[in-house]
Amino acid sequence: MSAPPRTRPVRVVIVDDHRVFRSGVRAELAGAVGSGRLEIVGEAGDVEEAVAVVAATRPDVVLLDVHLPGGLQRPGGREVLLRSGPLLAGESAADPPVPPVRFLALSVSDAAEDVIAVIRAGARGYVTKSISGEELADAVQRVADGDAVFSPRLAGFVLDAFGTGAGEVAAVDEELDRLSAREREVMRLIARGYSYKEVARELYISVKTVETHVSAVLRKLQLSSRHELTRWAADRRLL
Amino acid sequence: MTPVLQRPPVYRPPLVRPRTGRKLAGVATGLAVHLGMPVKTVRILLVATAFAGGFGVVLYGWLWALVPSAEVPPLSAPATQPPPIQPQPSTVPPPFGAAPVPPSGAAPVPPFGAAPVPPFGAAPVPPPAAAPTRGRVDLVAGTLLLAAGVVLLASRSGWPVQPGLFLPLLIVGAGAIIAYAQFDEVERARWARRAGAGTGPAAILRIAGGLSLVVLGLLLLVVRGIDIAQLSRTLAAALAVLAGTGLVLAPWGLRMWRDLDEERAGRVREAARADIAAHLHDSVLQTLALIQRRSHDPAEVARLARAQERDLRGWLYGRAAEDSSTLAASVAALAAEVEDVHGAVVEVVSVGDRPVDDRTAVLLAALREAVLNAARHGGGSVQVYLESGPDGVEAFVRDRGPGFDLDAVPDDRLGVRESIIGRMERHGGTARLRSDPGKGTEVRLLLPDREEAHS
């Protein structure tokens, strides 16, 4: 991890409607909690509870299940994100500054609609529940540092959705509807199963640069109006 | 039916009013397309008959009102012939021999013979499964001709023809045919509305038209010999009675309709639930039973759970129908097979897709070998990335195993050298191996498209 060492553990809230799964995540993260990297400050089992717990504890990272009971909209995880909207930004002007609450989606579902729903609502990444404890702790840390977390599947989805497989590449990095050549390379390596560190070594760039590229892709994923992205969203009345 | 001239099943476009190439309402153009005659001939005939007692004008107006406006289906489209329509229990049985309208309206015309006129009201020969729209039109025209013939015969044989009796009957008959023949269309429009598509007001309009024809005909029949003033009064009275009856019966009809709707929705829900239950029983419950029996064997339990997860996932997210006609689906199936046999976790990420052909089949075979190798030696976790681009296909297989040195592999070991590298190179592709001792192995398969390879 290239981020500066944190002075306090990352405060985490686990949101999932299955108690068994929540305790499973706790157990998986026990190592990171024991070493002082993470601290689990709350749990929630449905939309209402999640919104309340997040507002009360203001954690650094919320591990958010996509499909949650309660609330009015589907998927429920998206509603939690929308209703926690003001917290996502944080208050850098306040004294002391209030850090933003960041969300990492954690779900068994890898359907494209679910991915797009939570990412466009503001989640900083998406990992499936088959992730190992060590990887999950890394992902939480990374999200807490403001970076994005892409699993191979999410990277593949991004490449597909932005037409990169069909050879569409942005001429300038700022173009929202396509990936730049470098972003494409990074996404392809992640889709091939490379860790950020391995991507950095492969491309002769720093891990920080990899993180910058991934964050840029996340931003495009959230803001792009590419019809592949908006169509999924529109089908589920997400826009 | 009397034996008819067997004629080859010719494709005849359904009678529609084409949107393009019409002069007034497209009736003549549509007729010409339908009958296979030049448009000019049809127009001349129409005009000529218009002077002969106004028949042409009536026919034109009538067809204008009755024939739906649509794009003319291309003549060379028999490939899109719908399969013979299964008898649908839900559709209204078409009375008066009106044939069910095939869904696409572009059905081929079965050898229906020269469409001899069936006696009015009697069912014609049971039409072959897919009776075309044309059948209906033939029927109408036939009825007209038959009626005309009967009148002619009657007048010839000295029986005094009373137009006052004959005309109303004809109108009633025509109205009934129109209304009944449209039932199919209304039924379909309702389904389309359910599915979120637009409504079909034209069909309802036509039913209304048919109904008013029937009413008009009946009135003419009843009020024969009464003058105009009385007629209008009678008409008003009849309408008032109809409206009153409708008003009284409306709530009842509405409730019936709603009950029917609810019942249908309930049946659909029930069917879906039964479907889910059946699937869960066949898959998840069976696997859980197996897992309980094999609980002493962790590897086997993991394998079963993984296979079941994959199956359920495919079912839930609509990837159940994994046919092997596309590359991505084939790779997914391949990964599933390796998972089942070797107990490794194979994650597949596919970008783009293309159909499997002879060349991609080669890539698949090499990929399969690479995945098998990775599953055997790679420490249980394999990552497959497949990208189908416009210039070719590229695939990566990565594992986190101990890695190995290709040069150290003896020549007689066919696995990597022959099955992967040799195979790819024989077909204009490349295969590259990269192995970091301790970090894992990655196989890269590249298959450029032929044009690219030759340029």
Image (spheres, coloured by chain):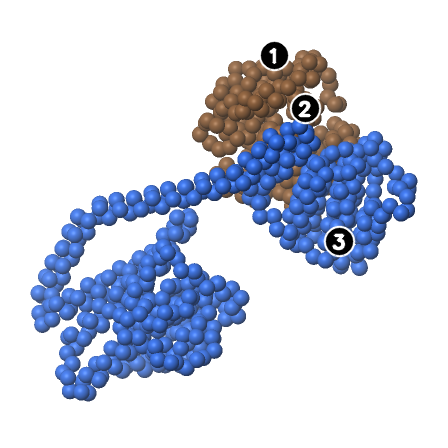
Residue A230 lies in quadrant: top right
Chain shaded brown: A
Q: Of the residues shown, which amino acid type is indicated by label 1?
A: Pro
Q: Which residue is mark 2?
A: A133
Residue B152 lies in quadrant: bottom left
Find numbered disc 2 in the image and state the secondary structure of the residue it sits on. Answer: helix
Q: Residue at x 47, y 43 (%)?
A: B275
Q: Which residue is mark 3?
A: B362
Distance Cα–Cα, label 1 vs label 2: 33 Å
Distance Cα–Cα, label 1 vs label 3: 62 Å
Tags 1 and 3 on a common chain? no
Q: Residue at x 39, y 48 (%)?
A: B194
Q: Is residue A187 visible?
A: no
Residue A96 is marked as: 1
| Nearer to us in this view, A40 or B1 | B1
**Chain under callout 3:** B
Q: Residue at x 77, y 33 (%)?
A: B379
Q: Of the residues shown, which amino acid type is indicated by label 2?
A: Gly
Give the colour chain B carries in the figure. blue
Q: Residue at x 66, y 17 (%)?
A: A30
Q: Of the residues shown, which amino acid type is indicated by label 3?
A: Val
Find numbered disc 1 in the image and state the secondary structure of the residue it sits on. Answer: loop
Relative to B371, does residue B75 appear above or below in the rendering? below
Find numbered disc 3 in the image and state the secondary structure of the residue it sits on. Answer: helix
Disc 2 packing (10 Å; few <14; some 14–19; many ≥20)? some
Disc 3 packing (10 Å; few <14; some 14–19; many ≥20)? many
Relative image position of residue A42 (x, y in whole percent): 56, 16
Distance Cα–Cα, label 3 vs label 2: 38 Å
